Image (cartoon, grey):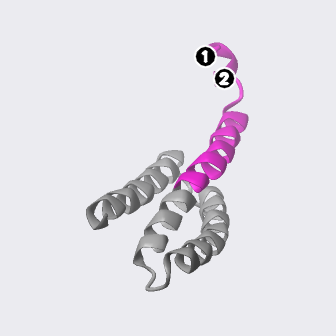
Amino acid sequence: MQKVLSHYPAQTALLSRVLASIFGGYLVAASACGLLSVLLPLSPVDATLVATMLSFAIYACAAIRAFCVKSLTQVWLELLIVSSSFYVTISLLS
């Protein structure tokens, strides 16, 4: 398998960016949705609805960002750092 992937570095890089935009973007959007639902000064139902609506825009921005950064390592690190910082903040606030 390693031999096959080494012959196609451009396709491997593209696949990694696609996976980062799909799964990493979802991770960032989900953790941002949780954080926003805790932070917004609305009723719990309204805060959840507003946070869910905003998470669609956050997901799109994270997916676009995955294709704008030069380094694949930086793409994954940014997504993991942002989502983990959101998660830690949610844990501290709850």
Q: Residue at x 69, y 39 (%)?
A: 15
Between residue 59 and residue 11, name the one nearer to us.
Answer: 59
- Considering the image in quadrants, where does the C terminus appear? bottom left
Q: Which mark is residue 16?
A: none
Which label was assigned to residue 2?
A: 1
The residue range painted magenta reads 1-27
SS for callout 2: helix
On the picture, is 34 further left or further right than 59? left
Residue 92: x, y in percent?
A: 26, 62
Residue hosting label 2? 5
When asked about the image quadrant of residue 59, the answer is bottom right
Where residue 47 sits in the image (x, y, percent)?
53, 77
Query: Residue pushed farthest left?
Result: 92
- Tell me where residue 66 appears, x and y as whole percent: 60, 56
- SS at mark 1 in the image: helix
Name the one closer to the observer, 63 or 59: 59
- Main SS class of the magenta portion in the image: helix
- Is 7 rendered above or below residue 10? above
Residue 54 magenta: no
